[in-house]
Amino acid sequence: MRTALLLAILGVPPAFQAEPAGGGLVVERSVRLTFTDTLNRRREVHRKEVVRLRGADVSITDLTFGERLVIRTGLKKVWKADPLAGTYSELAFDEVAAHRKRALDELRAVRARVPGTADEREITAILEGLDDFAAEPRVEVRASGALREVVVNGDRLRASVEVDGKLKADGFFAALSAIGAFHPAVAAKVRELGGLPRKGSLRYVLFLDRVHEQFEVTAAREEAVADAEFELPKGLRRIPLAGFEPAAERHPPKPGELQRGFREDEVERKNNPFRSGEKNP
């Protein structure tokens, strides 16, 4: 399922780009996800999910709570929906890149103020975990039987997976790469995995979270995937993406002006105990 987007990332001329095959791919998986944010706070999620691929469009649905991540490469948009909460977030690809750049610039600025310290080393590790390297990284694929590993700079493991070469999943990696999940050099190498990862682990960036995904495919089948699988449920309210987009500014209404009437002055004067000796007019 090779896509023009991934090949464009890799710099392959259009004349050599094959059109994606028709139909789609549906993959059911058991997944353990560890999310680490830029403050090194971690949260872990265990879930069953279904991944639907069609070309380089991807829909990932949590089968327990119905949360959905949809990446539409043709529209250059990503949606994150929470039907139980009745909300969704929407970002264009260029907005994802802009928010990410702003956050990375802030981290670099903080690091520049603490040279030679443990804080500098910690921030550097965070930046490299977000695929922000001081120099172009060296990326290689190591193969042993069905096992494939993608390694960065000799020791940073980005993928360690068993691959089914009969099913192609290029669209999955192309879509994630389009929203900054993989450094371009890593994106070039995950294409060499040669099929559908059935079991193992992946490390990538989702917005500003470093993600460690451990997974096992329980079912996979090629079939037509309906347009509705790449659309948002109806009736959701749009909100900023938590931890990534700045929160919407709140502008509370200005209270109405209070006016003091002459009658209020008269009532206060009559009720003032310290003025009991005064003669009321």
Image (cartoon, rainbow, N blue to C red):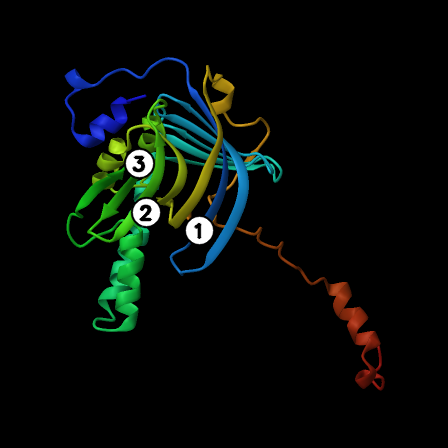
Q: Which of disc 2 and disc 1 is earlier in sequence? A: 1
Q: Quadrant of residue 55?
A: top left
| Residue 61 image point, x, y percent | 52, 33
In the displayed structure, would residue 41 be above or below residue 167?
A: below
Distance in Å between CA atoms under marks 1 and 3: 18 Å
Contact between labelled residues 3 and 1, with CB atoms less than 8 Å apart: no
Residue marked by disc 1 = 35
Viewer-nearest residue: 203 or 184: 203
Q: Point out the tag, 2 or 3, that comes first from the N-terminus.
A: 2
Q: Which residue is mark 2?
A: 100
Please name the amino acid that badge 3 sits on. Ser
Image point 21% across, 71% down: which residue? Answer: 115
Residue at image position (83%, 75%) is: 270
Amino acid beneath label 1: Phe
Per the model, the C-alpha gap separating discs 1 and 2 is 16 Å
Q: Quadrant of the C terminus?
A: bottom right
